[in-house]
Amino acid sequence: MLHLLWIAALLLPPLTESYTITLQPTDNLTIHIKRATNTPSQPCNICAPKCNALSLAISRGQKVDYTFDCSTPEKYFIMEVNRTIDCSSGMCPLNISLQPTNLHGLNRTFSWNILTSKNNGLIFGFSGPWLTQIDPSSQCPDHIRFKISTYVHDSSYSIGTFCRNGTITRIKVQERGVIALSLPWNLAIKDPGISITNRSSIKSLSIVESTFSQQSTVTLLSANYPDPFPTNEQMTWKFNLPENHAAAVQFLNHTSPMCVKKEENVHYYLPKPALHKLTDSQPANILQNFNLSLENCEVDTQKTAHPGLSLKFNITVQRSQGDQLYALDLTKEKGLVVHIKKRFTGRTFTPVCLICKAPMVCDSELVLEGGRYYKISFLCEQLSSLMVTAEKVIECWDLKTCNSRMPLTIPQTLIDFPVQLESYSWKLIAPENISNEIVSKSVYLQQDVVDKPCNAAAVGFTYDIFSSTNKDTLKVGAFCPNGSIEKIQLRDNVTITLKTPRNGNPAKLLTHDLHVSFVSFIKEVSIFTVSPKTEDMIYLETPNYESGLPDYASASWSINLTKKQSAKLKFGKDKMDISCEKGSAYVNIMEQKDGSPETVRREDQQLPSQLNIYSTFWVNISNCKPWTGTKKLKLQFCITFNQISPGEIKPSRPVLKYILIAVGLAVGVVLAVIATICCIKNKKKQIKAPVGIYNSKVNTEAPRRQAFFKKGKKNNESHIYAVIDDHMVYGHLLQEETNEMVPEVDVYQPFEGPMGNAPPIPLINFPNGSTRVDVKEESIKEDIEDRSIEGAIMDEPRSLSMKNNDIYVFSQSFSKQPVENEDTSITYMDDTRSGATTPVFGL
């Protein structure tokens, strides 16, 4: 027997708890249990008493026992409790209670249908916590949801869907209203906190009253949203504000109807009436209680495809500064644009601060143009959540009219403004043949590098400097005051952005001191002039350090030293650490005085570990085109400055030794020439007449390199001597014992300086007519080929300087075959060690 009972228990579905509902005859309500929408496919039935029902209705005066044949009936069934309250017979006011009180186990919706006469209205009051409106498709955090509806000509319209904890205290409807309260199956509440009062007619579809106890932002929707608002009807919102607070209205979304008569409008009572369109800017900075009414027109119901009237809007209530106004005088600031906006904090904050440029014209962001005078007010408790940014454009299209130096000023009105100036930018725009110069007169600049970062909080502000063309933008670097950089020249258009730290001191902006001017075009991306003041060590880095120096670009630094200063130059790494596809990258260091040697390193060579320098010098860094996907050229170097003591002697340099030897040789040559001339003159006195010698059979042409000088003398007779004096015959006496010709004059010496105010000749020669746009690869390729023909890429800087010297010009090839009928008045010496051929002018 027990075995059979066990088998039956397995075969029969499990039964849940048994429920009993008893309704008294005086209870004017009905209860419906029915299937919920979107239920699972597994069957679940109501057992009352048979287990085959899908719904159950209980009327007043009935007692019903029921259960379910599944263990989770809340997934399949819902319960609706409907009650009708007639206030036309004087039963109102009253407080609504949940009846019966023992209903649980299912998701429940309690609905109260309240009736009154046509000439009366109904007021639904909500005790704390008040209500907040949500979109009909949204859910409440605690799953307790209210829905308020009313009827117009027997058609139901939703006033809205609400959750607890909000600002809505009362809702008024005309003639008939329905309140629906939805509760989850596992939650029971004792008092819904709803009261009903009948009053005189409101002559409107509904009135929603919202009372603010503190600053907040709420969202409200028109009746029947997102469906169309009833035709030819009006809905009103009444807002009660706390003391010392103001409100702003912002329309988020709306649709317009197809009107047959009248137009849809928005009415404000502030307390004076004001009429607005849906597309107008809505009032803000409202300092007292006010009403907002949405009025619909008579809609053409035949055109059902039209969306009809709907509205979604925000009300922001915040602490107010009253009628306090702040002046912004931008009348003399042409080309300036000022933005006042919310400070970016990485998250959305509530409430939103609003900026007003008229009593009721406010927005979360304001754009002000220069040339006008503004009076600004704020709807915001903390102005620190706002910031000001400004941008000024300075243009130059003719260097003759704009070559004077101009200061970069910040209007005092922005410094005195209660909202912090976050950034101020100057954009310098000019044609491609004009460059820019930035000068700091009293406060030199320090470059912000890892080894010596800028302290923005201490100095009050920093600069970001950008250089840009129509195609590319590169960051020259970040800088701050109190450094050693006196001047920066930039080839392309420039943007200088002054940035202030959070909660910085506006008074420190008064130390800002930058001047700019437009100058003649330079080929380098940038040229820095460094004049150390008080710093013992400075750190510098190549432009666009984070991304690397652009291909084929060159940057120079002019480091100024006094006579009592010396410098130690040291690079941050041993090599440039790049691999060139085309061309070569170079570091060129040269002192700016006569006879100074150059220190040149290519990308495949070791950089100097340390250089001791005793006079003003240049540092030039030139880039190649690296292989795609490889590292970019970026270098950092530091310079340590030391004072030379009075007794300290500067170390001698090799070039000085060569100069002394050359001077000694020159003195010896002069003495030999004088002695020879004296002997010749004594002998000449014994000869009465000059002897003319000419031998046409003698070959007067010496072997020479082909086309070394393109212009010869074979077509004239300047190489034929009509008369030869004695001193020309004895010219061989000027040779020394080594048989090497030591010329007296006209001997070419390689160009070694001084460089003066111009940077070293760039080791990458840009094609003629190059602009600020990056040099094309074809031009660079031709340039490299030309240099390979002219000297097989002379790595020595002397050779490079000589190649570009006007006195001496290389031809395209160097043939060692003699050329007939060429000028033989010049003897050549071939110095194969240096790879260069030096001409010697004959005497």
Image: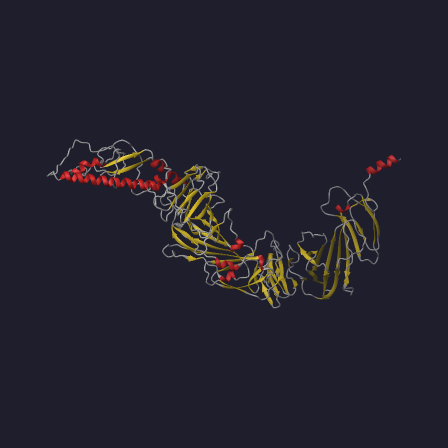
> Which image quadrant: the N terminus?
top right
Q: Residue 111: which quarter of the image?
A: bottom right
Q: Does 231 sit left or right of 807 as displayed? A: right
Q: Measuring from the top left, give residue 146's x and y in whole percent.
A: 71, 56
Q: Nearer the viewer, residue 731 or 11?
A: 731
Q: Does 173 sit left or right of 346 as displayed? A: right
Residue furthest left as drawn: 688
Q: Residue 317: which quarter of the image?
A: bottom right
Residue furthest right as drawn: 1
* Total numbered labels: 0
Q: How is the image coloured?
A: secondary structure
- Residue 116 makes an appearance in the image: no
Q: Measuring from the top left, give residue 831's x and y in whole percent.
A: 31, 34
Q: Measuring from the top left, give residue 801's x and y in whole percent.
A: 34, 41
Q: Does 513 sit left or right of 67 as displayed? A: left
> Which image quadrant: the C terminus?
top left
Identity of the residue drawn at 47% across and 62% down: 371
Q: Measuring from the top left, give residue 700's x and y in whole percent.
A: 20, 33
Q: Nearer the viewer, residue 89 or 552?
A: 552
- Residue 274 makes an appearance in the image: yes
Q: Residue 622: which quarter of the image?
A: top left
Residue furthest bottom as drawn: 272
Q: Does 767 sit left or right of 670 as displayed? A: right
Q: Is residue 484 above or below residue 120?
A: above
Identity of the residue drawn at 53% across and 61% down: 417
Residue furthest front as drawn: 647
